Image (cartoon, grey):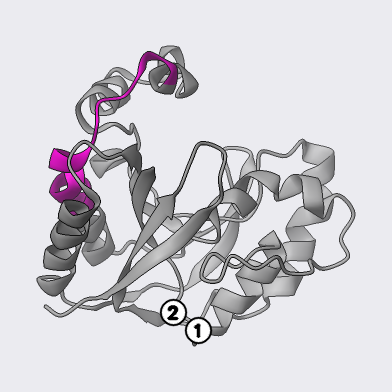
Amino acid sequence: MRVALYWAPELDDPLHARASAWLGRDAETGAAIAQPEVPGIVEATADPRLYGFHATLKAPFRIATSWEQVVATSEALAAETTPFTLPPLMVQNLRGFLALIESEPCPALDAFAAACVQALEPHRAPLTTEEIARRRPERLSERQRAQLDRWGYHLVFEDFQFHGTLTGRLPDVQRAVIEPAVTEFLGDLPARRRLVRELCLFTQAAPGAPFAIARRLPLRG
């Protein structure tokens, strides 16, 4: 089993239902959802559909300790974290894939992500040779390669970029169709300011299995 700490919209946030419909799966229930009629959408969303709509705080990892210890540490982190306001989000081309990103910096979010990386680290099993190879270490900067070795993921701390993934990597021709379609489909929902009041613990039962929300942990700081 792999686990991860993600941000995901709260269940009563309309963005949860809308983004889940775009991807074709609800990570809360595991249910498949009919996607909008957009040419190529099934293929374009195949990768993020596996994970469910989310933004990474602590990247997926195999457990070196126990599930109970992971839950306890995650609960403790949530208990000491104060809810904060997430800036308006916007659709952006991010290294070839489309995602919802912050429209302005959010130091509280950056600090939260860093705390997630550090808090769960004692529970992370070391990366295998295959897992390292999938990150294409030869393409990483020296700092990112060091972060991959130390933390199991290269985009942490200074390299952290909040993003709610909406597609896999797209060629320019396909992106020209998908980008206006997803922008229209999500409408003004991303741009609404919202409080981050939960930390979501996602699990993946086996390699290739879909990720699901196992716990929604309220921030109580």
Q: Is residue 149 left or right of residue 216?
A: left
Q: Is residue 114 left or right of residue 187?
A: left
Which residue occupies the foreground of this view, 213 or 41?
213
The residue that appears at 78% across and 54% down in the rendered structure is 178
Amino acid type at circle 2 is: Glu
Q: Secondary structure at mark 2?
A: loop
Which residue occupies the foreground of this view, 196 or 188?
196
Amino acid type at circle 1 is: Asp
Q: Secondary structure at mark 1?
A: loop
> Residue 16: where, in percent of width, then height?
55, 75
Q: Counting other residues with Cα less than 10 Å from the Cα at mark 1, is it few (<14), some (14-19), or many (20 or more)?
A: few
The residue that appears at 48% across and 41% down in the rendered structure is 206
Residue numbers of the magenta segment: 114-130
Q: Counting other residues with Cα less than 10 Å from the Cα at mark 2, is it few (<14), some (14-19), or many (20 or more)?
A: some
The residue that appears at 19% across and 47% down in the rendered structure is 120
Using the image, determine if residue 76 lies above or below residue 15: above
Extreme residue toward the bottom, this view = 12
> Residue 148: where, in percent of width, then height?
29, 26
Magenta highlight: main SS: helix
> Residue 126: where, in percent of width, then height?
25, 26
> Residue 106: where, in percent of width, then height?
30, 64
C-alpha separation, residue under disc 1 versus residue under disc 2: 5 Å
The residue that appears at 43% across and 64% down in the rendered structure is 213
Q: Is residue 83 magenta?
A: no
Identify the image quadrant of residue 152: top left
Q: Which mark is residue 207?
A: none
Q: Which mark is residue 13?
A: 1
Quadrant containing the N terminus in the rendered view: top left
Give yes or no for contact between labels 1 and 2 (Cβ–Cβ under 8 Å): yes
Quadrant containing the C terminus in the rendered view: bottom left
Which residue occupies the foreground of this view, 191 or 146?
146
> Disc 2 marks which residue?
10
